[in-house]
Amino acid sequence: MLLDKLKKILPNNNGNDYPKDFQQIIKNLYPESVPDEEAITFIWEAYRFSKKAHEGQMRRSGEPYFTHCSSVGIILSEWKMDTRTIAAGLMHDVIEDTEMSRNDMVDKFGEEIAELVDGVSKLSGIKFSSRREKQAENFMKMFLSVAKDLRVIIIKFADRLHNMSTIKHLPLIKQRRIAIETRDVYAPLAHRLGMNKLKIELEDLILKTLEPEEYKLLQKKTKASSKQREKYIEEFTIPIKEELSKFNIQAKIFGRAKHYFSIAGKMQKQNKKYEELFDLFAIRIIADKVEGCYAILGIIHQLFTPLQERFKDYIATPKSNGYQSIHTTVFGHKGKMVEVQIRTNEMDQTAEIGVAAHWLYKEKGAIKADDSNIDKHMRWLRELVEVLQAEDSNPDEFLKLLKVDLFKDEIFVFTPAGDVTPLPANSTPIDFAFQVHSQVGIHCIGAKVNGKIVPLNMVLKNGDSIEILTSNTQKPSYAWLKFVQTGKAKSHIKRWVKKEQTEQSIQLGKEIIEKTLRRMKRISILDELQAKPQIMGFNQVELVYAALANGQLTVRDIIDKYQPVDYNEQDFDPESQSLTERFINRARRQAKGVTVDGVANALLAFAKCCSPIPGDEIVGYITRGRGVTIHRNTCKNLPCMEGEDRFIFVEWNVKPQTSFIVRLKILLEDRKQLLKDITECISALNINISSIDMKATEGIATCIIVLEVRDTRQLDRLSTRIQKISNFISTERM
């Protein structure tokens, strides 16, 4: 019947029947409805174009290469993708693997199709076994392509699924590489986009490839127990069906087998044998309406005893990938536990194919996304791309953020207005603040969880209600990076800290050269520098200032470039410098208690940006003209410093009773006698206060204290005492 329709719609196929794989695509798209003539014609032209382009090419299996392309088209049609996506899927390897060019495709099928095919071709070039930097670069290209059109990754998913299903024909080394790629990227990404069926298929194929013996064993055991399991499920569902019929509730019930990858994971995690797993029994109930889902839940809990800690309502609070369902685990007869999933037909479709379910076919092959659902599904992807496109982003950092966001479990928290916000597990109020808005995160000064002020590093739990306290004077702290979980928060904090550090370096460098040139009465050099910074190898004068502050350049370097004449060496003599400068230099030479490569009393300075004290892990950085600067290993400025050969080993060599300067920032809810309580904590430990500055804004008191301490142990004892002060919010070392 379908063949007859095709013969009426399409041009004559030289008297031959239309290929079965092509017929399968059309049958998947139009199982009952009348086929769209224009759509079928478009897919047929793409089918013929690709087949001709790949003519003569063979796969390792010995099959014509085009069988892979048509299989991708069939998978996309099963996912009910639009005409243009299916057409692009049929031709996804044409640009990369044939003599056909992108221009040929534009001429034949238009710019939209060419963009899709070109995007998939770029993804196909990714080599995950390459160096880390190259891997990161390829990840970046991948997500930029997907950001332009989500359908690119859907085509790539279909491509990867078919390649994994036919992977046995490849060499073993290549099999493992592709399987690991799929495990580390494509399966988790499918999960993030709500494509659960695809995720399961990929994971089982991964297990089959990487652990073939374990896969065969699980397959054998599952097959052996299938009849027993089916019988148990049938007995379990009988009273459910009777109750549904009694209340005239329409629903479909069917058993759901656990997939092999999941079983293997649980066996390893719980250190149990296959026979010891209790939740291999699972059913799914599909209701007509949402109200029916909750009615069925009531019936299930009435018939069987539920396991409270295994109940999840993802209908009321959907996952970030759009997944909706009610999960409950109950004790069935014979004491066996059964996992029950309850959802509507629409929810089931979304759970199976995720984001693909939200692309709607329209006439002439045009598509329109369900904007609300796409926005919900793709917020995470857009945030990744936002990080990627940041001016100061780098591939390696992007890779780190990707891994953070790709592999995290979720929790659900609430705004004060009651809106649900999904976050990665172990998230903190800072993560929540940046999720609300980047400016809320930047100016976050405190947080209330369930109505109580809490530390900013508190780990949030499911169901928490969070209110963020802000102040326009507050800035992100580098210390936040130790506990934040989301890529968005990490990215914004790092960008802000780097920007602030750059601004400080520029200002410091400018002050250094202005003071020196004025003293030498050669201020005209400053005008030349501002007019032609290129002479120093920089496009902007601000970069010269920053290089001067960071030790990459000296004032002498600049003078020699612009006015290379004799000058008085006395101008650089410390004795001729200002009182402040002499004090700074003297302090630099008196960095107490540190040995450089076994040599004491070297020209040393403690970095003011991190103020290391005994107990800190430290590293030395060789500056130009200023000796060795001692930094904490966690110093925010270390990533900005150039030249790995300029970092040297240093260690503590502290004499008794030596004190060191440290700065603390303490946040507390404002009240009377707050300063008194803080100073009493400090004096109790016999710690000297060098300076203290305290101000209150919007009910939050900010206290900046400069202290003299012996080591990190003394500082830790002080921090513990401060945390016990009433109305305490947070403390951090500056």
Image (spheres, grey):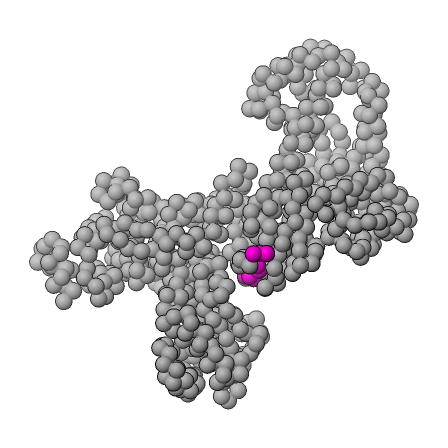
Residue plotted at (57% across, 71% down)? 269
Q: How many numbered discs? A: 0
The spot of residue 61 in percent (x, y) is: 30, 61
- The answer to whether 585 is drawn above or below residue 704 in the figure is above
Q: Tell me where the magenta segment starts and ends, as one range.
A: 410-417
Q: Vertically, is 461 above or below 481?
A: below
Residue 216 visible here: no
In magenta segment, residue 416? yes
Q: Position of residue 198 (x, y in %)?
A: 39, 63
Residue 473 vertical position relative to residue 253 in the rendered view, above or below: above
Residue 344 rendering spot, x and y as whole percentages: 39, 69
Residue at 12% x, 63% y is 4
Q: Quadrant of the C terminus?
A: top right
Residue 2's quadrant in the figure?
A: bottom left
Could you tell me which residue is drawn at 62 percent across and 44 percent down? Answer: 442
Q: Is residue 369 visible?
A: yes
* The quadrant where residue 218 appears: bottom left
